[in-house]
Amino acid sequence: MRGRSLESREVPLRQATQLPLTAVAALLLLLAATGQAAGEPGAKGRLRVLCYNIHHGRGTDGDVDLERTARVIRDADPDLVALQEVDRKTARAGGVDQTARLAELTGLQGRFGCQIDFEGGEYGQALLSRFPMSEVTVYWLPGEPKRQRRIAVAAVVETPRGPLRFVSTHLHHQNADFRQRQAVELNRLFQSDPIPTILAGDLNALPGTRPLLILSRSWQSATGKRADRFTFSAENPSRQIDFVLYRPASRFHVISSEVPEEPAASDHRPLLVELEW
């Protein structure tokens, strides 16, 4: 895989058969409790993944309110968060590094990937994680270089169950040909990756359309064929354009998916998925 690496930014038995049955049970309980205390993402390796286009913190009331955005994230209690439309020190954000601020407000680690220079700062995407992240890389996707050229920002997440790659992306909102080419490139970038991978983002495409069919060659959708996970618009959700995908299929099992009831903090609603891996 080719990409541009980023500097990481912190934004902050004995043999059981030889033991009596009661001792075996007690030992198993102790091991389970120890795993949880060490930061296990669920007793069976469960991960809560949130995908959220935050519209640079601007809500449907026109206010930019990162405290409100952070509250939505905290209420979902995620392990991993993929954020789209994030500002870093732009004029419209009042010079605030939104990734750093959201990391501070949620208690998660944050990494930012720049998509374009904008209003004296940068505009792009961010990853938040309960676990350490490394190897943060921005990959360019096909598109217009002078008008919101699109990216995927990826990081290796060091979970107690081992490493996985976490990717955020945001496909073109107007050009269907670009969306299809971007989907092809996402497949090319990650389909041979030996590390289990979760891809989350605003794909600006509906289930069953060409970009999703292209992605389905390499990825599984955590919402499958459901037709009720509407994420847009926030005030009157009528379609799903935000997704959580994963690969390989054999490494993950979907426990649940939902769209939290949040009509005001952004023009999108977040998508929350719980995976077991």
Image (spheres, grey):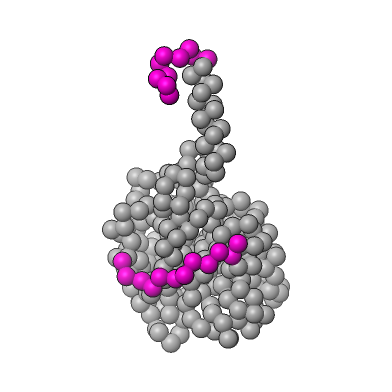
- Residue 240 position, x and y percent, is 50, 62
Q: Which quadrant: the C terminus?
A: top left
Q: Is residue 19 above or below residue 56?
A: above
Residue depicted at 54% across the width and 26% down the height: 29
Left or right: 67 in relation to 36 = right
- Residue 230 position, x and y percent, is 54, 59
- Residue 48 position, x and y percent, is 53, 50
Residue 96: quarter of image: bottom right
Q: Nearer the viewer, residue 124 or 259?
A: 124
- Residue 12 position, x and y percent, is 60, 62
Q: Is residue 252 magenta?
A: no
Does residue 157 show up? yes
Magenta stretch, residue numbers: 1-22
Q: Which quadrant: the N terminus?
A: bottom left
Residue depicted at 48% across the width and 75% down the height: 114
Q: Is residue 18 magenta?
A: yes
Does residue 54 show up? no
Farthest residue toward the front? Answer: 14
Residue depicted at 53% across the width and 67% down the height: 9
Farthest residue toward the top? Answer: 20
Q: Is residue 40 above or below residue 147?
A: above
Q: Nearer the viewer, residue 37 or 64?
A: 37
Q: Is residue 8 above or below residue 93?
A: above
Residue depicted at 47% across the width and 49% down the height: 159
Q: Main secondary structure of the magenta part?
A: loop
